[in-house]
Image (tube, rainbow, N blue to C red):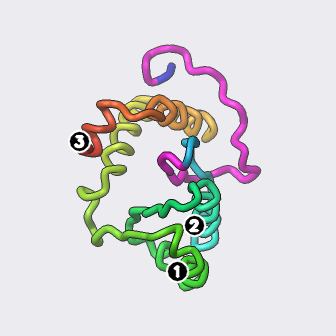
Amino acid sequence: MGPAGGERPRRPPCPDPEEPRALRGRSAVRRGHGCQQASVFNALTFLDFLKMVVRHTRRGRKLILVLDNARYHHAILLREWLRKHRTTLALLFLPPYSPDLNPIERVWKLTRRLCTHNQYFQELQDLVGTVVEQLARWAKPNACLRRLCAVN
């Protein structure tokens, strides 16, 4: 049974050949919505994510990413690449230990409640599919997201 009480459709296999253990969310990047899957998060996977974001950023626009203080967000490996792309991309870090300032934490909390509470997922792909379906429902701005993120 799916989160809305109906039968959950069978999901296609995860595109990553290695089974992902986590999802990194991303909001609207041009017209695309979605997530990046990785079995490990480190400076290299974060750099891949940044490259993907920059590729999908409109020319002449500067994108500001608001981030927590995960160690890989501050890696030395990123410095030169970030310097080269400073006209296109800026990283803004939240103060340490401040989940209340990070609106995505409220979105993830509701997503977990809607998608995973009282649910059993035999395969990780089923869990990923359920979360992706919920994020797709929120692909366009709506009252629920405005309330969660306190956007006026």
Using the image, tell me which numbered label, if any, was put on residue 152. 3
Residue stretch rendered in magenta on the structure: 3-29
Q: Residue at x 54, y 85 (%)?
A: 76
Q: What x and y, as percent, mark residue 78?
A: 57, 79
116 in relation to 87, above or below: above
Amino acid tagged 2: Phe
Residue 11 left/right relative to 138? right
Identify the residue under disc 1: 75
Q: What x and y, as percent, mark residue 79?
A: 55, 83
Q: Earlier in the sequence, mark 2 or mark 3?
A: 2
Dot 2: element: helix
What secondary structure predominates along the stretch shown in magenta?
A: loop
Front residue of 78/59: it is: 59
Q: What x and y, as percent, mark residue 85?
A: 57, 74
Q: Residue at x 51, y 19 (%)?
A: 1
Asked if the residue under mark 2 is in contact with the one under mark 1, i.e. CB atoms within 8 Å, the reply is yes
Q: Would residue 120 be seen by someone viewing this image from the given angle?
A: no
| Numbered disc in front, either 1 or 3 | 3
Amino acid tagged 3: Asn
Identify the residue under disc 2: 46
| Number of numbered callouts drawn | 3
Q: Would residue 25 be seen by someone viewing this image from the given angle?
A: yes
Asked if the residue under mark 3 is in contact with the one under mark 1, i.e. CB atoms within 8 Å, the reply is no
Q: Which of marks 1 and 2 is nearer the N terminus?
A: 2
* Mark 2 surroundings: few (<14), some (14-19) or many (≥20) residues within 10 A: some
